[in-house]
Amino acid sequence: MQRIARFEKVSLPRFQADFPGPCGEAGAAYEAVVLPRRATRGSAGYDFFLPVPLTLAPGEGALIATGVRALIDPGWTLVLAPRSGLGFKYRLQLDNTVGVIDSDYALSDNEGHILARVFNDGRAGKTLSLPAGSAFMQGLLLPFGITEDDEAMAVRNGGFGSTDAPCADAPDDALRDLTDAVQALLEGERHPLVNLANAAALLYETLRDVNWCGFYLMDGGELVLGPFCGKPACRRIALTRGVCGAAASQGRTLVVADVHAFPGHIACDAASRSELVVPLFHEGRVIGVLDVDSPRPARFGGLEQDALERVARALENACDWTRAGYRLH
Ligand code: SME
């Protein structure tokens, strides 16, 4: 049996945004989310469980936020169908008949949150009533093939039926003007934390498809979290750990196309797929790193490296590093 996928809970904010019930109930429902699992060793289907109770009279439907996303290796897909017993008893249907979760759906802005719209299509007048925690849907992980002349290159971003969304892969115009924009922001200010905070905000706003952007500064021989934008991140990173530790200890920029393939990568945000880390120098020594993460694989290349290294040089020169409050050396 090939192990080619992993189920994860989506973030609480994502779940709250998609939760169809009253806002006040989203937190408890999120707590009740359990990851899909197979009932027996021989089962093909992963059972998906209800985070909230479900009651459907004949002819009624409901949207279910499962709270789950699937990280699937390329070449595989997750096919969703109603749990067979419920189909048998109530003609329970998925509104999209069968769900097809693509391997790149997890990279979408919505974290690849799996939503199910179900419908009681029963003809015998039976109301379906299931408590929270009941299995209602099953998912099968299946391999798929592609045609000999297939050249699909677009990267998904979006939910239902969005594989035809335009792919934002044009060169990033914003990169050209980035150094000027950063210089303008640093003008007349020498405090490192002020400048790093504003630089993190500018980069986060400017760069497409970035889910974390910020700084770690050296403090007593390890990297310690500095100003950033994105999800809360790990506070301290030893120089022997992660992409940040590697870039700082080697004193060079690292561009990682697939963070899952980088030994020791530290996942602060499960959505991150690629990463670029630029060391910052003062008086010939590394004093910190600029770290940028993306939910898209291979988001960063030579253009980004060049632009962000110029940003790093601008920051090194603009700041009075004695005021950082970190033990930088
Ligand atoms: N991924 C980094 C850790 C920092 S977070 O991405 C913000 C690393 O492996 O060093």
Image: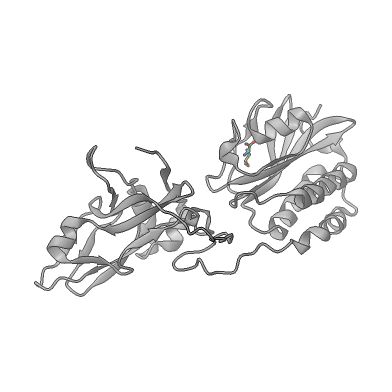
Q: Is residue 171 left or right of residue 237?
A: right
Q: What residue appears at the point 28 percent right and 59 percent down from the top-left corner?
A: 81
- Ligand 1: which quarter? top right
Q: Is residue 267 left or right of residue 328?
A: left
Q: Quadrant of residue 23?
A: bottom left
Q: How is the image coloured?
A: one colour
Q: What residue appears at the point 32 percent right and 57 percent down from the top-left corner?
A: 80
Image quarter hosting the N terminus: top left
Rendered location of residue 317, percent (x, y) = 90, 43
Rendered location of residue 102, percent (x, y) = 45, 57
Res. 229 in view = no
Which of 124 and 67 lies nearest the eye of the viewer? 124
Q: Is residue 114 left or right of residue 277?
A: left
Rendered location of residue 325, percent (x, y) = 78, 34
Rendered location of residue 322, percent (x, y) = 86, 34
Image quarter hosting the C terminus: top right
Res. 6 in view = yes
In the image as oriented, which residue stretches furthest toward the front? 148
